[in-house]
Amino acid sequence: MNPLLRLIAFCILAQAAVLGGAFQPRFQQQSQPTPVPSPSPATSIETPTQVTTRSIIRVNSTNQAYDYQSPWQKKPSYSRRGLGVLIGENRILVTADLVANSNFIELEKAATGEKSTATIERISYECNLAILRATNPIFLYGMIPLPLEGKVSIGDSATVLQIEPNGELARTPGRISSISVAPYPLENLGLLAFKLSIPLQQRDGSFTLPAVRDDKLVGLLMRYDARNQTADIIPMPVISRFLDSVKFPRLGVSYSPLRDPQLRRYIGLKEPGGIYVTKISPKSSAASAGLREGDVILAVNGLPLDQDGNYEDAEYGRILFSHISSTLTAPGGKVVLKILRNTKIEEITVKIEPMDRSNTISPSFIADAAPPYFILGGMVFVELSRPYLQEWGVEWTKNAPQRLVNYDAFQDELPTDRGKIIVLAQILPSPDTLGYDHIDNVVVKELNGRPIKSIADLAEAAKHPVEGFQKIELEEDPKWLFLDAASIEANRAELIKHYALPATERLDSATSALP
């Protein structure tokens, strides 16, 4: 072979050997299994903003309340949208307002639009809180429970979370301007509330909104005053009490401040503070412990009260003493009251229990329950309740029949054995009610000589006509109404068909939805 060709061939072989040695180790490295690091908990790798985004979820609720004037039917359904907060495994915190009288509850992930149905695990209209559970727990996989903020003071910052239509998180910062015992929306009950100064914008799905601080839950927005740019927040102490028990204990007293020096001298009060007990609710914790009208409460659990009933709280400063009895004390717990009675200082231990509403004459709030009714020949009878009076609109205290409004307002002054107040609400035109069409909203006293204290009493009395007639006695004019019992039975089927009634009676009394 030509020496020149040999030299070229040798160079080519040498270069191939070098290239082969260069590529071979890389290929071997790629073919070897790559070690996979052990996964860390999601919370350890999430940034605060990511944690919060994956801790809240849209809640869409379709609600439908009963028509209390025509209680066999419901009103048109309506929808509410808000944000729920994941606070534990398959536990989503929302306000009770959001899901009251719900027919259908839907959860929606803001980022993906995925949806799942939900059910109510527990609900308390007293503190306006509810816990939801996803029907399919796998739906919440990858979400992270939001930690709970334990301590907040006046002046601290807090951020209200909202979700934009595109799924992005909107944060609006605010500042806690006051902490006090404030009225909650569904009953005349005062519980701890934070006042948040915040310029909040209305966004779709803002019925329930979480407030956070350092990406820990401070509370849920309960209401917003756009004019003053302030929001009332249900705070963590109330939420914690709700998570322990849906029932909130109550002392059951009404009182007045003791600022009048003449009254203080008259009752022999020498100490600087104290409040004057004006009323004790029947069957309340205070009544069971022997507290009396005219007593002066000077201290609760050793904490002196000022002349308005405030004490110095270690966390929140000056605050109403009912915070001790309603939130800090668990149901069945005890508080010690220092009182002045007949110029003598005494101590009374009170076992604090939730209010007994089983014998409430006119319930202040009813939800998730069908109201009772009884129809007799076209006469529609119902039990008096606050929701019934609220059918007259926002100014129901002025527009509703005043006799009924007074019964509701002063029901505590009625005899304890009064029972329910039965109202002839309306007259459905029928052959049996001719001439009675002008009568409505009158209180029934007796039927066929039998006292009426419930819808069930009315139904039972109707089985015993007097000489062939249903004899109805009213508390006011026209005093007496008479219906032909045989005619009522003969026309019953036609009445049901004509007015599309599911039945002419529902007898179980609707007790208050409050605990």
Image (tube, helix red, strand yellow):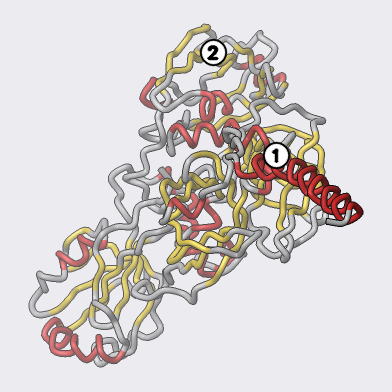
Instruction: Give the residue displayed 50% in from the left and 51% down from the top.
Output: 409
**60 on left or right of 22:** left
Identify the image quadrant of residue 238. top right
Q: Amino acid at mark 2?
A: Asn
Could you say which is closer to the camera, residue 89 or residue 8?
Answer: 8
Residue 107 x/y as whole percent: 53, 59
**271 on left or right of 375:** right
Instruction: Give the residue displayed 61% in from the left and 45% down from the top.
Output: 55
Q: Identify the residue under disc 1.
A: 25
**Marked residue nearer the N-terminal end (2 or 1):** 1
Could you say which is closer to the camera, residue 173 or residue 195?
Answer: 173
Q: CA distance from mark 2 to mark 1?
A: 79 Å
Instruction: Give the residue displayed 64% in from the left and 41% down from the top.
Output: 28
Mark 2 or 1: the one toward you: 1
Badge 2 density bin: few <14, some 14–19, many ≥20, Cα 10 Å: some
Above or below, comparing residue 258 to residue 431 in the picture: above
The dot on residue 301 is: 2
